[in-house]
Amino acid sequence: MPELNTRVERLVAEGRHAEAADLLLDKGHVERAAELYAAVWQWGRAIEIAEEAGLFDIAYRHAIAGQDRDACGRVLAKLEARPEQAVRAATHAEQRGLLLDAARLREAAGETEAAAELYERAGDLRDAARCRIVLGELRKAGMLFERRLREDAEDGASALELGRILAQFGRWDHAVRALQKAAEHEAHEAAALRLLVACFAAMGMDEAAGSRLDALRRLQPELPVTVPEMLTEVYGDPRGVAALVGQADSERLLAGRYRVMAQLGAGATGRVLLAHDPFHDRQVAVKVLNVGGGASGRDAFVRFGREARVAAGIEHANVVSVFEFNPDGPFLVMEYMAGGTLADRLGDGPDERPRRLGPLRTWAMAKGVLSALEAVHRRGVVHRDLKPANVFYAENGDVKLGDFGVAHLTDLGNTLTGALVGTLAYMTPEQITGSSRPDASTDLYALGVILFRCLTGRLPFEGPDFVAQHLEDTPPAPSEVAPWLGIAFDDVFAKLLAKRPADRFASANDLVDALRTLPWAAAEEAMPPDEGEAAPARPASIAPAAAPSQSGARFEVLETREDGIAIARDELLERTVELVPLDAARAERLRAFARADGPYLQAVYEIDEALGRAVLEHPSGVPLATLGGRDPRRAVIVAQVREAIGRLHAERVVHGAVRAGVVVVGPARAVLRVALAPSPGADTAADWAGLDALGGRARGAP
């Protein structure tokens, strides 16, 4: 062997790779021989000798390197019968970004879970769903088929499979819609019609079931004439698929789907229920309308339907998601906000003493609400009913705006009756009088009332005659009610609570800019404990340690990266953040990013040059670089990054490092991270070129 190695090394040194390879081949060293042929780009020969020796994983690797797709296909077919080699080939395929090949190989090796994930990353949702069915994960499979149909509504095979899954969960109405689409395709017509008969029968729609049976018998005349007989023959029970789901269990479900777990709240016009959605395996909040007849009932129903249409059309990280509107209930299915409402935190209950929120928590809440308002105002929507009960907290502390029941579309007319729907304590003068159409300043006035209460512990107008006070009285300055705030907040609140809309802030972004200049941290430090409390509800000191790599009274450092940035837990605001060391240049750059603040830019929470530290958002999710090139979310992600870049350029800021590694893809949005050290000479063109590389369009509208 040493002699053989010496001869091979000498031949290679002389550039005689083919001779060295033949020598190795003669001695039975096939893998090394193939490597030498590959080294001189004789890919065909490398593939050939590896195949002949049964080393199909080696042959596949060389077929990839030689970009020989015919050989890849041929070898892949052989690898499917050889699980051990398939696993090794799959690893190589993943490293080269060939996700579909990797998925096929993982599936052949029996690694179905890994195959499902790879198919999904590659954008092959139908095969991903097929793997989920094999794993018994019908909910995940159903969601994948739903996504596939959003991509291609004419995919009859996916529509049929989705209908089958929905029927298994007793979601007859949703199954019918999918099956009707599948029945339009000749290849799936008979199977779809058979299940349509069963679903219509389960819904008690006998005429529709009979009609579908007639259509089915034209294809299969041997079937029984009546629906019960057909269901008995096909499903073994005259109830059909309803027997498989379990009729007794189905009767306890709302709309045959949502299992009610508890009542979250109730009012004069309806209830809010906590329910479990078995199809998506998640908790949801179900808002059920309960009104009588007559004009008032119709008005309530119209407002309820408006909430559904408005909220369902807004996808934003700071807006409560709406999943479904059922007009027959009627009920609205929404994201369940396990963290409760701002009203809960302020002590709005009948037996509770009102509480302050505190400056830093108020500022964090305000940024979330303003981010939501900026998004909805851009769509021509005014919320019109901003109050603490409509500001929600997710389990992780994220702030979201919800309840668009009286949201006003700005291109519609305005009436006095409609204007008086909102809550009087937070209502603007123009809403009370109906003197002008609501606009962005209407919501900002209501937010001003909320912020005043969060900071001072009381409303600017305490009633009971809210109408006269909003119309005639001058609100007190925050410093009059809470002297420890100082006068820095007074001018902002005077503008927020101005009687005339024209005298207020014109947009959510304008208000963010104004609020950002206020001394929130100093106010937090000066805030006395609420009356009746033995000790402050906050830490004794909010100041962190001098260096971000050390733990302080407010921040608990979880990890310190090589670049000196610390990942920490903000104990005061109950969130994970990044602590960034500062110098003057970095502070100036972060201020520029803060001015461009938007939902798809990493948020800059605080900049404190005295402590040499900035506090930034720690985006949740995975780097875009880890997603496959055919990930179905990529188009949305790129659009969000484009908006983030546009915001930066509007502030005359160049990002300077736009690439997949600085984009974090979370469950609800993508976030472009701050570039602390931009590439030398970077300009706006470089940013758009970076977007191009992500799959965007360099000169597209920001």
Image (cartoon, rainbow, N blue to C red):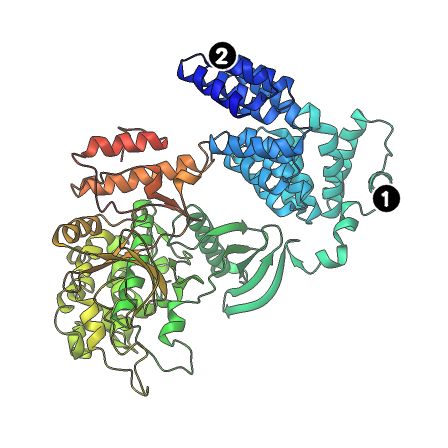
The x and y percentages for residue 573 are 33, 67
Q: Name the residue under label 2.
A: 18
The amino acid type, in three-letter code, at marker 2 is Ala
Query: Relative to 468, is 260 above or below?
Result: above
Query: Relative to 348, is 577 above or below?
Result: above
Q: Residue at x 24, y 39 (%)?
A: 646
Placement of the C terminus among the 4 image quadrants: top left
The x and y percentages for residue 526 are 19, 77
- Foreground mark, 2 or 1, reads 2
The amino acid type, in three-letter code, at marker 1 is Gly
Q: Residue at x 58, y 61 (%)?
A: 275
Query: Relative to 416, is 35 above or below?
Result: above
Q: Nearer the viewer, residue 537 or 408?
A: 537
Check disc 2: other Cα within 10 Å, few if <14, some if 14-19, many if 20+. many
Q: Which of 266 and 273 is in front in this view?
A: 273
Q: Do the residues labelled 2 and 1 touch (CB within 8 Å)?
A: no
Placement of the N terminus among the 4 image quadrants: top right
Residue 605 seen in this snapshot: yes
Q: Name the residue under label 1.
A: 236
Q: In which quarter of the image is residue 161?
A: top right
